[in-house]
Image: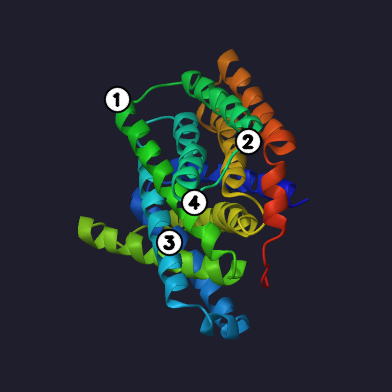
Amino acid sequence: MKKIIILAGAIGLSFSAIFVRLANANSVALAFYRMFFAAALLVPVALWKHKEEIKHITGKQWLLCAVSGIFLGFHFTCFFESLDYTTIASTTVLVDTEVFFVTLIGCLFEKEKITLQGIIGILLAFSGSLIITLGAAGESSNMVLGDALALIGAVFIAIHVRMGKHCRTNISTTVYTAIVYFFAAVCLGVEMMLRGISFGGYDSYNYLLALGLTVFCTFLGHSIFNWGLKYEKATFVSMAKLLEPVFASAMGAVLFREIPDVRMAIGCVLVIAGIVYYILRGNKEESVSASGQVRSGE
């Protein structure tokens, strides 16, 4: 059931590129208000219901949560701005290559092992993701820049996920996400000031889209993945996000006429097949390990 909930988070996450494409506000400002609204809603709840837990958070845990939030802010900057240069399919697929960076970080720094079946599942899904990219409709004048920003965003979100895996061992979902979203908002706010981006002057349409990003993509997307980090391997959580380009590409085709061709359809099938194979064969050992972790209140 936990795996199904995590996979469902990809549906909420897939609306992110759609909302960003529909907005006409500065992309960094849009990202800032997404995190600002999330923090404004969660921080009071955390302070009210989890006072004792917050008192017992160590300095190291505060630092890890803060760094996790900062890298989440960096990720949003790259992800949102990449959509100015490339297609929804390309951006979402390349951002979701985070699974490789998550796995690489785990293998290099945390002595985490991955089975051969797990590797096969990842490669199968990623090959489908590449096919989706090749089949994406339309090109922009600077698609290389957009693709590069998406890849950098993948690195940033991978660091965020790895940090979150450590934090979620002893910190509840509500407290962790409240801290992370607060620091992400601060990070994006500082970036806006440094770049001379206005905090105001946007119409209600853009603020509503930012609120939609908060509710659908943050609370029903990222927050679900943050919850799942307590129970599943970080690689699996990142793997689940590979469903995002499938849903996002489908919506992009309907709303923005980025019509997928046969290669796109084949790619979607491969992504789903890779995820199913990873769940059934490649993640068994890690699921057992994750289920044995100490679990604090949620």
Answer with mark 4 or mark 2, whichever residue precedes in sequence: 4
Residue 83 seen in this snapshot: no
- From this view, report whether residue 233 is shown above or below residue 150: below
Label 2 to label 3: alpha-carbon separation: 30 Å
Label 4 to label 3: alpha-carbon separation: 21 Å
Image coordinates for residue 290, horizontal then vertical, percent: 67, 55
Element marked by disc 4: loop
Residue furthest top in the image = 262
Residue 115 — which label?
A: 2
Q: Is residue 218 left or right of residue 65?
A: right
Residue 69 — which label?
A: 3
Q: Name the amino acid type tagged 1.
A: Ser
Q: Nearer the viewer, mark 4 or mark 3?
A: 4
- Residues marked 4 and 1 touching at CB (< 8 Å): no
Q: Nearer the viewer, mark 4 or mark 1?
A: 4
Answer with mark 2 or mark 3, whichever residue precedes in sequence: 3
Q: Name the amino acid type tagged 3.
A: Gly
Nearest to the observer: residue 175 or residue 115: 115
Image coordinates for residue 80, horizontal then vertical, percent: 40, 45
Residue 141 — which label?
A: 1
Image coordinates for residue 157, horizontal then vertical, percent: 45, 48
Label 4 to label 1: alpha-carbon separation: 41 Å
Label 3 to label 1: alpha-carbon separation: 32 Å
- From this view, report whether residue 264 is shown above or below residue 41: above
Image quadrant in which the C terminus is located: bottom right
Residue 110 — which label?
A: 4
Element marked by disc 1: loop
